[in-house]
Image (tube, helix red, strand yellow):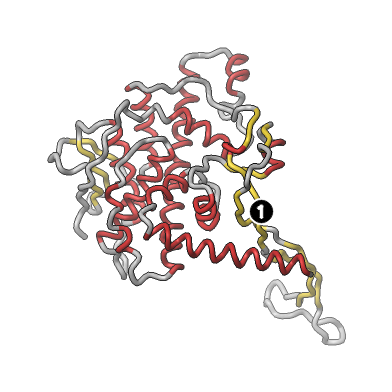
């Protein structure tokens, strides 16, 4: 009984830590730093991303003590201080429930007119604190990586941009336009326009910015978001996705983020972070998938011997889990779209008036 109470108290403290973390993210000037951390943990809830950021902002890949040993053949360094997150630990319980008639949906009766019951097993959602460790706190076998098929040249940049275009919900058009505009999403034409002649970094980040507009701001709503809120959401998603692929972008546009919190509850701010995280995750998943497909096509076009392909790649992505796959894709794609001296994106964008 005492152990359950201790767990409850710990969860209460963690909840308070999450709430403090939400406020700190928006008001401490560390919003961009949080987005960088968030982008690395696409399989975690917004609560756990906040906890990881609060305890270890530089964390890159986390796993439990045993998972590092069994999944990755690495071990946690002696004296390493773990990161506390929340893990679901549902329990099963059997209950007696009224048996309903499949047609009428009314309780069924026995010969005596009594309601018939049946035993059912239900799952009760519970959570408990668990400890994970960052890869920097471990040593051992390197994480799996892809073969050296992606390097920093134009051909591979083109392949990456094609994957970005495939991930967009509307067509992307690259065309000449005035210098102070990177691009815009047209609500009426249902397409994205990008300025021709921008650097690779500018083009990628502007594309993701406008893809976010196309995903989140593509319909008239009863309560429309302000232009500033829409720009915060689009720029946040673009920053997080670019951070995932190692693309350096300008964080100056987050200078006014503290004003965004005025009058908003913790729950509203957390929902905002969740929306940004989920949208970034969706875009990253799509880009990763399309890049992987194109890499497979490239291998087929080169007619690589089957035994060599199997030895080096297995089924192209032979990783223990999605997180390890994304880590390796990240390491290889960093040089795919990043200039030697990446330039920041001008933050002036044009959006169709609604």
Name the residue nearer the viewer: 186 or 84.
84
The residue that label 1 is drawn on is: 130
Quadrant into which the N terminus falls:
bottom right
Q: Where is residue 219 in the image (x, y as percent from the top left)?
A: 31, 60
* 70 sits to left or right of 31: right
User: Which image quadrant is residue 139 in?
Assistant: top right
* 294 sits to left or right of 162: right
Residue furthest to the front in view is 79
Which residue is pictured at 70% across the width and 61% down the height?
A: 90
Q: Position of residue 253 (x, y in %)?
A: 27, 50
Which residue is pictured at 21% across the width and 48% down the height?
A: 349
Quadrant into which the C terminus falls:
bottom left
Q: Position of residue 29 (x, y in %)?
A: 35, 54
Name the residue nearer the viewer: 77 or 37.
77
Classify 206 as above or below 335: below
Which residue is pictured at 62% across the width and 14% down the height?
A: 307
Number of disc labels: 1
Residue furthest to the right in view is 112
Q: Is mark 1 on a helix, strand or loop?
A: strand
* 303 sits to left or right of 76: left
Q: Position of residue 295 (x, y in %)?
A: 47, 25
């Amino acid at each position: 009984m005492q152990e359950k109470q201790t767990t409850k108290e710990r969860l209460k403290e963690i909840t308070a830590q999450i709430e403090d973390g939400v406020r700190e993210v928006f008001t401490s000037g560390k919003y961009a730093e949080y987005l960088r951390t968030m982008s690395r943990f696409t399989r975690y809830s917004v609560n756990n991303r906040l906890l990881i950021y609060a305890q270890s902002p530089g964390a890159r890949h986390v796993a439990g003590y045993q998972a590092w040993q069994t999944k990755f053949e690495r071990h946690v360094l002696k004296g390493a201080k773990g990161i506390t997150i929340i893990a679901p630990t549902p329990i099963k319980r059997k209950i007696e429930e009224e048996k309903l008639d499949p047609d009428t949906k009314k309780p069924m009766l026995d010969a005596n007119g009594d309601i018939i019951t049946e035993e059912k097993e239900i799952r009760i959602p519970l959570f408990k604190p668990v400890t994970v460790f960052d890869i920097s706190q471990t040593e051992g076998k390197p994480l799996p990586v892809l073969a050296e098929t992606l390097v920093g040249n134009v051909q591979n940049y083109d392949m990456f941009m094609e994957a970005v275009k495939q991930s967009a919900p509307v067509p992307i058009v690259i065309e000449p336009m005035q210098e102070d505009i990177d691009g815009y999403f047209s609500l009426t034409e249902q397409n994205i326009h990008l300025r021709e002649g921008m650097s690779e970094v500018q083009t990628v980040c502007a594309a993701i910015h406008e893809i976010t507009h196309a995903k989140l701001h593509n319909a008239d709503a009863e309560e429309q978001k302000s232009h500033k809120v829409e720009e915060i959401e689009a720029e946040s998603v673009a920053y997080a996705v670019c951070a995932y692929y190692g693309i350096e972008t300008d964080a100056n546009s987050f200078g006014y983020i503290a004003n965004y919190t005025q009058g908003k509850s913790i729950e509203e701010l957390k929902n905002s972070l969740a929306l940004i995280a989920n949208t970034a995750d969706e875009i990253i998943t799509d880009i990763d998938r399309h890049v992987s497909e194109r890499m497979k096509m490239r291998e087929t076009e080169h007619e690589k011997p089957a035994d060599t392909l199997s030895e080096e790649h297995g089924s192209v992505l032979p990783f223990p889990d999605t997180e390890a796959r994304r880590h390796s894709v990240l390491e290889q794609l960093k040089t795919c779209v990043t200039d030697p001296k990446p330039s920041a994106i001008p933050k002036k964008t044009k959006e169709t008036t609604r």
